[in-house]
Structures are given as structure tokens and as C-alpha cells.
Amino acid sequence: MSRDHDDWKAYGPQTRAVRAGERRTLEGEHSEPIFATSSYVFESAEQAFARFTGKEHGNTYSRSGNPTVRVFEERLAALEGAERCIATASGMAAILALCMGVLKAGDRVVASKSLFGPTMTLFQNILTRFGLDFTFVPLTDLSAWELAAKGARLLFLETPTNPLIEVGDLKSLAQIAHTHGALLAVDNSFCSPALQTPLRHGADIIVHSATKYIDGQGRCLGGALVGSEALLGGDVYHFVRTAGPVLSPFNAWVFLKGLETLHLRMQAHSATALRLAEWLERQPGVRRVYYPSLPSHPQHVLAGRQQSGGGGMLAFELDGGRDQAWRFVNALKLLSRTANLGDAKTTITHPATTTHARISPEARKDAGVSEGLLRVSVGLEDLEDLKRDLERGFRAC
């Protein structure tokens, strides 16, 4: 059983998360099968020729497409309200495919200063070697975006951001991008389509690290680009098919299982994260808590308009510097000291010395990543257990 993109519009998001893209084989399976194959058999030489030349749709080689991966792509596209999705080997591979597919030497990109460390490294240290130019502006300064967008080909941002959980105004940024003939790409990894659908606010392309909430249990690496057929079906697809940063069938299957529970998990993450953020605001020694559902968050009202929940990510800043932050982290017994996020298990990291360690001190300062900042990905444990563990950190300070 399969339905095309238009048919799935009639169904609710949780139904799409469970059903979209499914195709049963002659075996009549109820769970999607894993097609662990690198190649496919053709009925004739004529059919092989027709498929390889694009005259006939069908499988050719798993670098060009795989049935399990295709179901994941169709399901994620349905959740985001998009025509097309291209799955990749990681979130960073998705960003690379975006740049290689829509940009050429001499093009300029305007990006937020508040980006994931490896994204910043990719932009500043690698892609500039191939003739791309990058301008970085504060996420929430719309006048800076407006000024920088002149002559740009692509505007790129995360919302909420990593690690300060800033929220970008998608509708306004889409208007700026389109006024200047640019595309707007949005990294939606922190919210996932369960809490935010950027295409509905004017974005052109959505980036996902499926490693995060789409998986939900920290098992697999994967990424995706979501958008229109016109934007993704040409050069972006050809880059992925040719260069080969493709998603494995097994990882696609794991992500399909993750999508089935995505909405339930994101509601639970959001509910616990809000209560934990409220508790952290009352703790002595905490300079500031960053969480969009808190009234103290600078973009609290905006987040309420374009997100259906605060999400599972929060950050807080201690009064001291690196030594105090490390003592805090080292005192914990329950929270996992790891840089991954979006897991059922709560994780904590010190961004200045992990996710953002390889960018310059000046870039960290511009991004607001201080030595006292800690990022927490709130999992699915009991709230009181999380509080007790964090109290160990406060006592160590």
C-alpha cells in the first residue's frame, strides 16, 4: 500500500509518521523490510538501459536509491509537507550536499553566527577553499540579514540554535531571502517536524540530522534534505548519487521506527525540559537559562508562534568559567557526558570544549558560547531524578 504526496495531505501528522511511504511486498509484511542489497536484477538488457538512462523508473544501484531508504524519505517529506526528501549518511553530509547541489564557485552564503561547530568549520575552513563566500550575522538581527542578503544565493540558519537555543524568525527571513532572490535553508534538527515545519513559514529547504530526535535513542547516523522536487531532484540528488554520501538501509529502517513515536517523544521531552528549565532558573549560581518556552527567553513569543512546543534542548550558564563547569559535569552520576543529543537518555556537554572546540575563540564569543555554558538534551527519565543529579553538580561548584 502506498499513497502519493497529495494523498497524505489528508492525514494527520501522527498518521503520516506511522504510515506514509509504506509499500508491502508479496510477503505481506506489516513492518517495513530492510532491503540489504547493493544492486538489483533487471528483466532484460533493454530494461537495464531504460533505467540507467532515466527513461524508466526503478532500482539500479543502492547508491542511487534503495527501497528502505525511499520509504524513510517519503515519510519524512510527508511530515514536513514537502514534495521530496533526500536522505544522507549524516546531518553534516546533508549540509554538504545542499551546498554542492545549489551553489557554485563565487556564490555567497549568509549564515547565522549561532551554528553547530562542525557546520561553522565546514563553511569557514573547507568550502571557502572552493570559491564560496560566507557572511555571518546575528540570528535575531533582521536588519543585518537584510543588508547581507543583497547578492546572496543562500541564507542558512538553525532554529532553535545549538547551543544557545535562540529562535530565528522564519517568516521574516523567508521574505528577506526571496526579496533578494536567495534560498532559505533551515536546520530543523532540534524541533523535528513534530514541533516545527519551516516550509509552512516560507523556508525553501529543510536540513535534518536524523541522528538526533528522529532516531531518538542515539543508535545511528543519518541526515536528510527536504524541499521541492525542483530544488532537490536535480543537482542535489545527482551529487548524492554520484559522490555517495548515502544513508544505509539499516539506518533508514531504524529512523522509520523512530518516526513512529516522534510526536509522543517530543511532547514528553518538551514537558520535562520546561519543568527542568523553570527549576534551573531558581538555582543559585545560575546566571541564565536558555529555553524558548520560558517567559524570560528573548524570543519566547516568536517560539510560541512557530513551534508547537519548546523541545528537549536547554542550556544554562554558570557564574564561573571552565573549571566550575567541568567540576559540575564531573560530579554527575545519571546524566551522560556526551556531545550527542535527542536521546531518550539525558545528556550534558560543555560546548566550548566539545562541539565548538575547533572554531576560533572569536567565533565562539560571537556565538555566545562562554566557558560557563552547559547544554542539556533532556531525555525521558523522571524529572526528580534529573534534579537530584544536577544538584550533585551544584554542590561540586
Image (cartoon, helix red, strand yellow):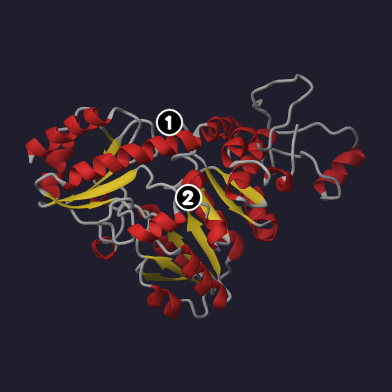
The local crowd at label 2, few if under 14, some if 14 to 19, many if 20 or more residues have their Cα within 10 Å, is many
Q: Amino acid at mark 2?
A: Met
Q: Earlier in the sequence, mark 2 or mark 1?
A: 2
In the shown orientation, is residue 262 left or right of residue 10? left
Report how far apart the C-alphas of labels 2 and 1 lie in the structure. Answer: 19 Å
Q: Residue at left 55%, top 30%?
A: 257
Q: Which mark is residue 374?
A: none
In front of the other: 6 or 254: 6
Q: Which quadrant does the C terminus fall into?
A: top left
Residue 204 picture quarter: bottom right
Q: Residue at left 87%, top 46%?
A: 50
Q: Which quadrant does the N terminus fall into?
A: top right
In front of the other: 255 or 291: 291
Q: Position of residue 161 (x, y in %)?
A: 37, 55
Q: Position of residue 366 (x, y in %)?
A: 27, 66
Please, what secondary structure does the residue beneath circle 2 have?
helix
In the shown orientation, is residue 166 left or right of residue 259? left
In the shown orientation, is residue 293 left or right of residue 213? left
Residue 30 picture quarter: top right
Q: Which mark is residue 92?
A: 2
Q: Position of residue 288 (x, y in %)?
A: 19, 54
Residue 243 in view in this figure = yes
Which is more foreground, mark 2 or mark 1? 1
**Residue carrying label 1:** 217
Q: Residue at left 53%, top 61%?
A: 201
Residue 215 in view in this figure = no
